[in-house]
């Protein structure tokens, strides 16, 4: 009898180990599938991200080339240029430069043509030569009105070289601003990539801000959004919560990718983040055609997809659901023609406060 119990215990232990190993293998497979989907989604973004980075880099290169050319052409001649300026013209140069550096309204092509003609007409009536050329220079400088004080200067032969020099100085200033703007844009894209790729190897929850992940995904999708999608953000001030941050980024990627595809990248995308009692609620709404009633339950099933063959694995929403379940949250769908909303709720759990080690 004891031998029978011993054999039974050994079989139970053996079966338990097999089940534990199978469960561990299943968890590893699930984690691998999630990571695989994440990398596939990241691969879809690479072309857009490359374009988004190349655009500011191109602006930086163009601006630096202009500044370098300006310095090459004028660095040795500028001292002579200013020495030859009468005191009055030097003061006028400074005044023109300050006016040109003051932001002015952006004009359409039609408005520019109309304004240039009006300036040229005014100068011609004052008997000023090269009225058309001077009118173009003044328009480039954003000096389109209050020309009365400038008429004495514009009547002089050296007015055109003076205005051209002012324009070159303003373009150097604009180039430095373009470099700063482009650098900020590049840094934002790099930060979004780092945020998106953030991965905690411990497998434990980390304390993170939900909206940081959403903003990162939106930045990476900017190239697909900017030409036809209007994005409305409504983000409440939500404190950081304990979560699997990199997995939640996969949730936002899948939901935003589906929303953009549903709209064919033309329409309105609303993203709402709010706190409801002890939960964070994220709603992603697109203005696409909607999900037919008979498909509302099926779209969460593994391998179900409405996309053409080769364009979707049918695992995106299933993975989203699994990640939300892992957070003990909820995922729901509300859809009518012209408005589809995926709602995600996550518990407002926080990281436990580390307790001091008691002294021995």
Image (spheres, helix red, strand yellow):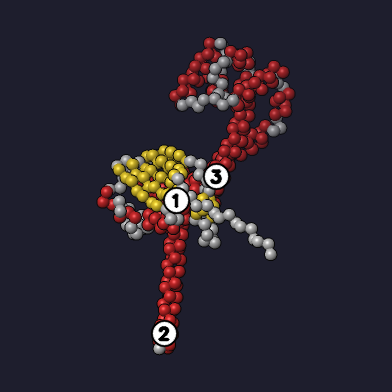
Marks 2/1: CA–CA distance: 47 Å
Q: Which mark is residue 346?
A: 1
Q: Which mark is residue 311?
A: none
Image location of residue 60, percent across then percent down: 58, 41
Instruction: Answer few, some or many: residues within 10 Å of disc 1's Cα (few below 14, many 20 plus, some between 14 and 19).
Output: many
Marks 3/2: CA–CA distance: 66 Å
Label pair 3/2, CB-CB below 8 angstroms: no
Is label 1 in a helix, a strand or a loop? Answer: strand
* Residue wearing tag 2: 5
Image quadrant where one finds the C terminus? bottom right
Image location of residue 114, percent across then percent down: 46, 20
* Marked residue nearer the N-terminal end (2 or 1): 2
Q: Is residue 120 above or below residue 286?
A: above
Return the residue nearer the eye: 27 or 47: 27
Of badges 3 and 1, nearer the viewer stands 1
* Marked residue nearer the N-terminal end (3 or 1): 3
| Residue 305 visible | no
Q: Which residue is found at the position 41% from the left and 41% from the top?
A: 270
Q: Is residue 4 above or below residue 226?
A: below
* Residue wearing tag 3: 188
| Residue 202 visible | yes
Q: Is residue 81 above or below residue 179?
A: above
Is label 2 in a helix, a strand or a loop? Answer: helix
Q: Which residue is found at the position 50% from the left and 44% from the top?
A: 238
Image quadrant where one finds the N terminus? bottom left
Return the residue nearer the eye: 158 or 101: 101
């Amino acid at each position: 009898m004891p031998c029978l119990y011993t054999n039974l215990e050994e079989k139970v232990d053996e079966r338990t180990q097999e089940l534990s190993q199978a469960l561990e293998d299943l968890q590893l497979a699930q984690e691998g599938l999630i990571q695989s989907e994440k990398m596939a989604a990241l691969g879809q973004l690479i072309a857009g991200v490359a374009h988004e980075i190349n655009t500011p880099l191109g602006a930086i290169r163009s601006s630096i080339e202009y500044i370098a050319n300006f310095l090459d052409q004028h660095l040795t001649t500028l001292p002579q240029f200013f020495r030859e300026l009468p005191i009055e013209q030097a003061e006028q140069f400074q005044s023109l430069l300050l006016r040109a550096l003051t932001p002015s309204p952006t004009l359409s092509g039609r408005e520019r043509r109309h304004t240039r003609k009006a300036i040229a007409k005014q100068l011609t009536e004052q008997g000023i030569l090269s009225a058309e050329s001077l009118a173009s220079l003044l328009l480039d400088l954003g000096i389109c009105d209050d020309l009365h004080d400038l008429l004495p200067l514009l009547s002089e032969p050296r007015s055109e070289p003076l205005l051209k020099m002012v324009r070159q100085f303003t373009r150097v200033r604009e180039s430095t601003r373009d470099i700063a703007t482009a650098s900020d844009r590049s840094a934002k894209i790099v930060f979004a990539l780092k945020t998106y790729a953030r991965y905690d190897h411990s497998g434990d929850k980390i304390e993170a801000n939900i909206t940081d992940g959403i903003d990162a995904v939106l930045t990476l999708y900017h190239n697909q959004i900017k030409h036809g999608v209007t994005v409305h953000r409504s983000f409440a001030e939500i404190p950081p919560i304990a979560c699997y941050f990199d997995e939640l980024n996969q949730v936002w990627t899948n939901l935003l990718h589906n929303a953009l595809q549903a709209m064919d990248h033309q329409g309105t995308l609303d993203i709402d983040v709010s706190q409801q009692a002890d939960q964070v609620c994220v709603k992603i709404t697109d203005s696409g055609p909607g999900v037919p009633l008979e498909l509302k339950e099926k779209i969460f099933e593994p391998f179900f997809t409405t996309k053409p063959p080769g364009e979707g694995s049918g695992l995106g929403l299933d993975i989203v659901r699994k990640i939300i379940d892992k957070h003990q949250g909820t995922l729901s769908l509300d859809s009518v023609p012209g408005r589809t909303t995926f709602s995600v709720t996550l518990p407002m759990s926080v990281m436990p406060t580390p307790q001091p080690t008691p002294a021995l």
